[in-house]
Amino acid sequence: MKAVVCKAHSRLAVEEVAKPQPGAGQVLLKVRACGICGSDLHALEYGFAETGGIGSRYALSSVGNIMGHEFCGEVAEVGAGVDAFQPGDRVTSLPMLNCGQCEVCRAGNPTQCRTFRVIGSADTPGAYAEYVRCAAFNLLRLPASINFRQGALIEPLSVALGGVNRGRLRPDTPCLVMGAGPIGLGVLMWLRVKGIRTVVVSEPSASRAELARRVGPSAVVNPREHNPADALAQIAGSPPAVVFECVGAKGTLAQAASYAAVSGQVVVIGYCMVPDEINPHECINKNLTIDFSAGYTRADFETTIDALANGRLDAELMITDVVSLDEVPAMFERLHQPNGPAKVMIEMP
Ligand SMILES: [Zn+2]
Ligand SMILES: [Zn+2]
């Protein structure tokens, strides 16, 4: 099968590789769409392991591996013991391989399972490929009203939902969303679904700011021109009680803390890969809470599927580019440029 393979630090290549075989309890998925995630760019840049062995388990991507964890498709083959799914079923999967049978899996803590792996990271192949292997246990069916592009947005929308669910929110809570990339846009969409009345988005890129405007926030502010906390205070009468940090660059966490109101909260979803500084003095004086949000639960996936199926999330507007597998290496180059695309979707016939 065709796949985009991690060859070396910052280098991808399209190659012909062996098609995976589904083991017991597993299915082979024919991938129909897979999103390119900012964390994949980070993985190839900062978390890449040149050598295999023990280190590769903790690396974000390894030589020879295939990335891609935001995907959906059709069941192509089922392994032994799988009777809940059949070839042709339209599904997405939590991007995890775990047994689904041991005590911790049954208790809903898959990351503690002995067999736990993240699909598309370290040495576990992902969906920048024609086929990907999944655990039947982690599949979710796509209703007919959800197309494959939407299906591949369920994972990043669930990341955003996981962050929003950590926010101490009431309808009148003034919120600031920093960054209108796919995660920031997802956070904004969920805040609208949850009926939060005042949301300001801070985004320096004109094209991303335009995407945010289409979701319908109270205002979109260029942080290089105006202080977004002041802009929010003008509308809501007070600075942001909750700041969602969806940029993940060096310095943005301290910025988030400076924007937040006294006794406010910062929810960190942006994935900053380098050590960063905050000013504890300012955080203490403000009595600030900083919450780091990682990932989602199966319930978040189910909520996202419902919201997409009912038309409550117009998520496809975040897709600015659609590419084939062959075009992925060049697209990674483009994504490193400032003012690059928002969500890039890889589509397979
Ligand atoms: Zn992702
Ligand atoms: Zn298990």
Image (cartoon, rainbow, N blue to C red):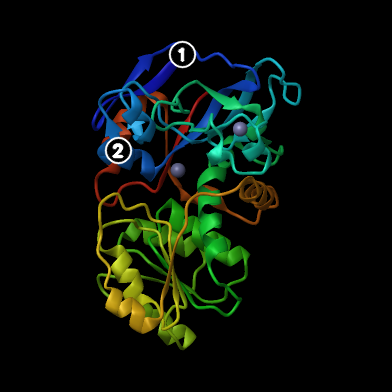
- The 10 Å Cα crowd at callout 1, few under 14, some 14 to 19, many 20 or more, is few
Work out whether residue 228 or residue 116 is closer to the camera in this orientation and state it: 116
Say whether mark 2 is within 8 Å of ligand 1: no
Vertically, is 221 above or below 183?
below
Mark 1 or mark 2: name the one nearer the start of the chain. Answer: 1
Tag 2: amino acid: Gly
Query: x%, y% of residue 272?
Result: 32, 53
Q: Which residue is drawn at 61% across and 29% down?
A: 99
Residue under numbered circle 2? 47
Question: Quarter of the image holding residue 219?
Answer: bottom left
- The 10 Å Cα crowd at callout 2, few under 14, some 14 to 19, many 20 or more, is many
Tag 1: amino acid: Met
Q: Which residue is drawn at 59% across and 29% down?
A: 73
- Total number of numbered discs in the rendering: 2
Work out whether residue 337 or residue 140 is closer to the camera in this orientation and state it: 140
Q: Is mark 2 on a helix, strand or loop?
A: loop
Query: x%, y% of residue 117?
Result: 49, 32
Question: Quarter of the image holding residue 64?
Answer: top left
Q: Is mark 1 on a helix, strand or loop?
A: loop
Say whether mark 1 is within 8 Å of ligand 1: no
Q: Which residue is drawn at 37% across and 82% down?
A: 286
Residue under numbered circle 1? 1
Work out whether residue 333 or residue 247 is closer to the camera in this orientation and state it: 247
